[in-house]
Amino acid sequence: MRDEVYDYNQERWEALVAADALFTRPMLDLDAEKARAYLGLERLGVPGDLAGRKVLCLAGGGGQQSAAFALLGADVTVLDISSGQLERDRLAAEHYGVDVRTVQGDMRDLSALDGASFDLVWHPYSLTFVPDSRVVFREFAKVVATGGHYYVMCANPFFSGLTHDSWNGEGYPLKQPYTDEAATSYPDQHWVYDRKPSGHQICEPREYRQTLSRIVNSLIQAGFVLTYISEVRNGHPDAEPGSWVHFTSVAPPWLEFVWQFHPGILERRG
């Protein structure tokens, strides 16, 4: 699905790779214990016995999750829009002596994975990089096995577009209508990559609001059952107002979901 959204995201992520941004750095110091702790499968209620299980890291290149899953014995496929990110996955796989399949593509078109039947689809933060999440859900529903799990981390739609820079002396005001596909853009956080001149121009993240009702109802209609939800909070309410730590304690910026695929469940309930 090559369009302006695809081109923008691809250009941005190739530039992030060139700048060695945080999410592009492969994990090269893992062992099985560290890999299990990093993924947090027990906390999420996802089966931890991954030996021989088929895992899809969806829009999840960079040599981080793929390496962890492969070290735990999973049969890993990574689909990502960035060739640079996928190169990091191959680098990590070579480092550990494991096999990882890499596929360059768009999460809105998984035709390259036709016939696959994944036990787990692992979707790190990227859902809000496309306007309509329903397209993504329809695609991976075609390649997940019955009883398989879907993990996704995404923006908390209620605070989409806000950062700690939104502090006005009293709070972090909501200003934009709560509508699906509303586009937002903001500067990367300082910890994402080194701001020293690198010769690469990095465009700001462009994200699209995915309302909670669209996310939840679309997945229910596609045959998924919700098994876990968490508001990811890394902050502390006593932190300095206007700091990132304070912001995340007032307006949790991320959500985590775990779903299990049971096609036809709505018909059976009816």
Image (cartoon, helix red, strand yellow):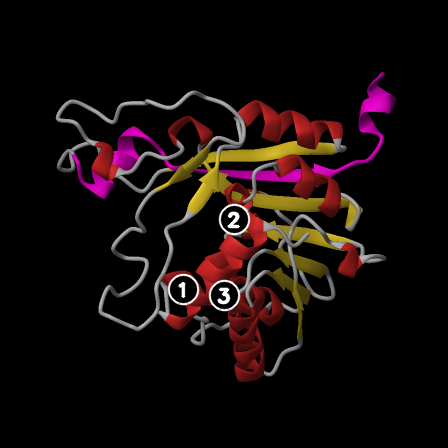
- Bounds of the magenta span? 242-270
Front residue of 140/96: it is: 140
Q: Earlier in the sequence, mark 2 or mark 1?
A: 1
For mark 1, what is the residue?
16
Q: Quadrant of residue 22?
A: bottom left
Closer to the eye: label 2 or 1: 1
The Cα atoms of the two marked residues, 3 and 1, are separated by 15 Å
Q: Dot 3 lies on which element? A: loop
Give yes or no for contact between labels 2 and 3 (Cβ–Cβ under 8 Å).
no
Residue at the extreme top of the image, as rendered? 270
For mark 2, what is the residue?
126
Q: Residue at (71%, 51%) from the top-left corner? A: 109
Q: Dot 2 lies on which element? A: loop
Q: Dot 1 lies on which element? A: helix
Residue at the extreme front of the image, as rendered? 4
Position of residue 194 relative to residue 256, above or below, is below
Give yes or no for contact between labels 2 and 1 (Cβ–Cβ under 8 Å).
no
